[in-house]
């Protein structure tokens, strides 16, 4: 390992690249390919989906890097699609391909030895994360030429940061955390192989062949080049913040939302979503007649017919929308918004999913950020993902965050809180003035 760390390259004032390499599956796989399906294709002009996990650790850093690589080589025997590339067949249909001659996953070792874990866990925005994450502002479409997964392992003053960039055209959040959990279990020695192998045949969920008129990153739609998270930051002064809701906060929110209804109670997700939607609408100071849209990127594994296993590897999410006037959100009790959200979610069954897919296949449109809806609150990720159980052998995470990519005004990521139980962290990206008002909203912050 010493040779690998011999040459240093500075990427900014605090982070140095120590080595760059690639990891392939430990055993030969041969040639494999799988067609991308309707659930995958709309994300081609989004950006790689980034996750950053921060750990406290006094372990030898070279040992950590080697253990990470060794475990990655084993887990990729099952998750080999992540070691492949995007390609198109003779009909122009996108697919993910793998063969043993490909370079595999890109792995970078870096050092930021003046940066402390506490500094990163206290970071409410994302400004300190950029140099800890690979593939900032890289389009998923560039997976035609770049690895579909890039990893950066960074030595901190008192810990380690693992930054990952996943090509969003080939997997969603459920698949991401399935992979991360399996990788960590192998690294920690709690499992010698992948306990639950991924279900890799996407065509079981949808087998329509869709040709898209895209061939290389430069052909991406103009919105994909300009509607970047950083571009939005410049244009709209976008800012991010994590709001941490304790278990008691969540219970109080849920009790409040359910106080005015004698029917079926609203779930934690529906209650928290209504709480966030209402507060963001206030913070934006929308006119009563202005529309506001709530969007949730919902897991469809148990909604499609036939149902797909939890281990289905790919994108099996679909955006579910509901819209109303801002004045109705503001003038009605909070259960009004919760009921709109619940109705939209419950009505999105196999028939609705199939109709949406059929409509898209008739006129394929690559998603733009604005497609989430006007004055939107768009919720991704899930507090159900057991992100704080991702232990590579040097302890559980101190913090789990999304990266800089794919952020826009109204994007919300939900994670379980580090304290466990029913605590939830809410990452919100908003225009700066609206976020300032949200930060002072005692009702939203549960300070009333």
Image (tube, rainbow, N blue to C red):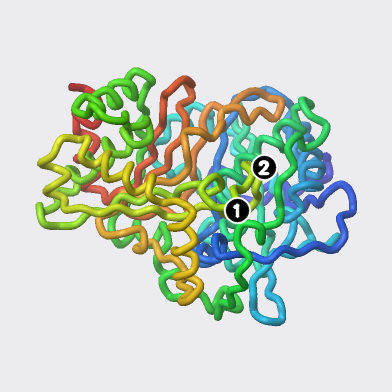
Q: Is mark 1 on a helix, strand or loop?
A: loop
Asked whether 135 or 256 is in front, the reply is: 256
Quadrant housing residue 83 = bottom right
Q: In the rendered structure, find residue 396 and report the number of the disc placed on it.
A: none
x and y percent of residue 447 in the render?
A: 21, 22
**Left or right: 439 with respect to 91?**
left
Residue identifier under label 1: 171
Upstream in the sequence, badge 1 or badge 2? 1
Q: What element carries label 2?
A: helix
**Residue at image location 10% in from the left, 54% down from the top:** 287
The N terminus lies in which quarter of the figure?
Answer: top right
The reply to whether residue 233 is visible in this rendering is yes
Q: In the rendered structure, find residue 179 and report the number of the disc placed on it.
A: 2
Q: Residue 377, relative to residue 211: is it above or below?
A: above
x and y percent of residue 161 in the render?
A: 60, 36
Q: Disc count in the image?
A: 2
Quadrant housing residue 385 = top right
**Residue at image location 71% in from the left, 53% down from the top:** 200
């Amino acid at each position: 390992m010493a040779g690998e760390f011999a040459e240093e390259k500075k990427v900014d004032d605090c982070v140095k690249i120590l080595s760059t390499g690639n990891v392939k599956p430990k055993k030969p796989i041969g040639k494999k390919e799988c067609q991308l399906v309707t659930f995958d294709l709309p994300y081609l002009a989004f950006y790689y989906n980034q996750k950053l996990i921060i750990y406290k650790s006094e372990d030898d850093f070279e040992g950590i890097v080697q253990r990470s690589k060794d475990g990655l080589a084993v887990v990729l025997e099952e998750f080999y699609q992540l070691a492949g590339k995007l390609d198109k067949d003779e009909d122009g249909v996108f697919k993910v391909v793998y063969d043993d001659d490909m370079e595999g996953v890109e792995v970078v070792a870096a050092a930021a030895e003046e940066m402390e874990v506490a500094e990163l866990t206290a970071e409410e925005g994302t400004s300190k994360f950029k140099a800890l994450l690979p593939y900032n502002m890289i389009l998923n479409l560039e997976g035609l030429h770049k690895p579909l997964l890039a990893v950066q392992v960074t030595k901190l003053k008192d810990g380690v940061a693992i930054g990952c960039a996943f090509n969003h055209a080939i997997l969603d959040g459920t698949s991401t955390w399935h992979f991360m959990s399996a990788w960590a279990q192998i690294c920690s020695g709690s499992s010698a192989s992948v306990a639950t192998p991924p279900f890799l045949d996407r065509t079981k969920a949808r087998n329509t062949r869709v040709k898209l008129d895209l061939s290389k990153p430069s052909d991406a739609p103009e919105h994909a080049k300009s509607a970047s998270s950083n571009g939005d930051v410049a244009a709209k002064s976008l800012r991010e913040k994590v709001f941490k809701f304790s278990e008691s906060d969540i219970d109080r929110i849920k009790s409040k939302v359910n106080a005015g209804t004698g029917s079926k109670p609203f779930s934690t997700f529906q209650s928290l979503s209504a709480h966030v939607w209402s507060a963001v609408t206030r913070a934006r100071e929308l006119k009563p007649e202005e529309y506001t849209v709530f969007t949730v990127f919902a897991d469809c594994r148990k909604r499609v017919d036939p149902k797909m296993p939890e281990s289905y590897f790919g994108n099996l999410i679909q955006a579910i929308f509901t819209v109303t006037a801002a004045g109705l959100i503001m003038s009605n009790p909070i259960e009004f918004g919760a009921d709109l959200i619940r109705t939209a979610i419950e009505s999105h069954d196999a028939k609705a999913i199939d109709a949406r897919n059929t409509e898209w296949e008739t006129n394929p449109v690559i998603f733009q950020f604005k497609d989430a809806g006007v004055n939107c609150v768009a919720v991704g990720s899930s507090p159900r993902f057991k992100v704080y159980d991702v232990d590579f052998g040097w302890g559980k995470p101190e913090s789990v965050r999304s990266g800089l990519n794919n952020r826009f005004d109204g994007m919300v990521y939900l994670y379980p809180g580090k304290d466990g139980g029913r605590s939830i962290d809410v990452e919100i990206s908003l225009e700066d003035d609206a976020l300032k008002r949200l930060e002072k909203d005692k009702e939203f912050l549960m300070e009333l």
